[in-house]
Image (cartoon, grey):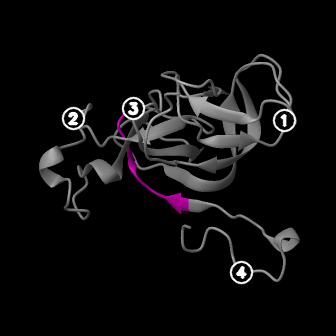
């Protein structure tokens, strides 16, 4: 469990997940609700360098830079933008908790609520073998992309493969 994500409570009914926020540099322009990924592969070398992977104080450390998300098939750290930014500027990103994220596809929260990322910075209905689930949608959705409330967990370890 992530320390601080769910505060202690006397019963399960009293659990209240809250946002875990960070302020990375945006390697591309990002808008509120965009699903982003921390650039652990240094795909955007203008802002990211794997030479500083373990130096968290460096601006170009991959843990300090986000890019528009790619499919969460092989793991990674994802987030939802809560404060927009132009490329090269800091944004605020929620890596875990309840947040509004762009969701596309028609479904109800009761039937198909797990969502994964795609290369466009939005969440879609999770399909086995296509992407690892990163959120549970808390509202119904029609087509989209639309901003919808989700319970988000951006820490993806493993694969979405069946």
Question: Which numbered disc flags the more N-terminal residue, 3 or 4?
Answer: 4
Find disc 4 in the rendering and name its residue.
8
Secondary structure of the residue carrying numbered label 4: loop
Q: Residue furthest left?
A: 51
Between the residue at mark 3 and the residue at mark 4, the CA separation in whole angstroms equals 37 Å
Of labels 2 and 1, the one closer to you? 1
Q: Which mark is residue 46?
A: 2
The foreground one among 25 and 126 is 126
Magenta stretch in the rendered image: 21-28
Secondary element at image label 1:
loop
Mark 3 touching mark 2, by CB under 8 A? no
The residue under label 3 is: 28
Q: Viewed as shown, does residue 95 lie left or right of 40?
A: right
Q: Whole-percent x and y of residue 140?
A: 86, 31
Residue 83 visible, this orientation = no
The residue tagged 1 is 109
Q: Is residue 125 depicted above or below 60 in this figure?
A: above
Q: Quadrant of residue 106?
A: top right
Crowdedness near tag 3: few (<14), some (14–19) or many (≥20) residues, C-alpha within 10 Å: some
* Residue 105 seen in the current view: yes
- At horizontal 17% and vertical 44% (from top left) the residue drawn is 49
Of badges 2 and 4, the one in the foreground is: 4
Label 1 and label 4: CA atoms lie apart by: 26 Å
User: Does the magenta run of residues contain 147?
Assistant: no
User: Is 82 or 115 nearer to us in this picture?
Assistant: 115
């Amino acid at each position: 469990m992530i320390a601080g994500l769910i505060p202690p409570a006397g019963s399960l009914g009293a659990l209240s997940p809250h946002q875990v926020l960070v302020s990375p540099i945006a390697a591309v322009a990002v808008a509120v609700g965009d699903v982003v990924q921390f650039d652990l592969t240094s795909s955007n070398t203008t802002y990211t360098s794997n030479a500083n992977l373990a130096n968290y104080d460096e601006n170009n450390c991959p843990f300090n830079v986000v890019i528009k998300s790619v499919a969460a098939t092989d793991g990674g750290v994802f987030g939802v933008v809560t404060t927009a930014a132009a490329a090269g500027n800091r944004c605020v990103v929620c890596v875990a908790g309840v947040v509004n994220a762009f969701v596309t596809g028609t479904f109800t929260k009761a039937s198909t609520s797990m969502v994964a990322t795609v290369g466009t910075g939005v969440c879609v209905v999770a399909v086995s073998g296509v992407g690892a689930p990163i959120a549970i949608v808390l509202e119904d959705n029609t087509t989209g992309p639309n901003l919808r409330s989700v319970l988000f967990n951006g820490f993806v370890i493993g694969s979405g493969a069946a």
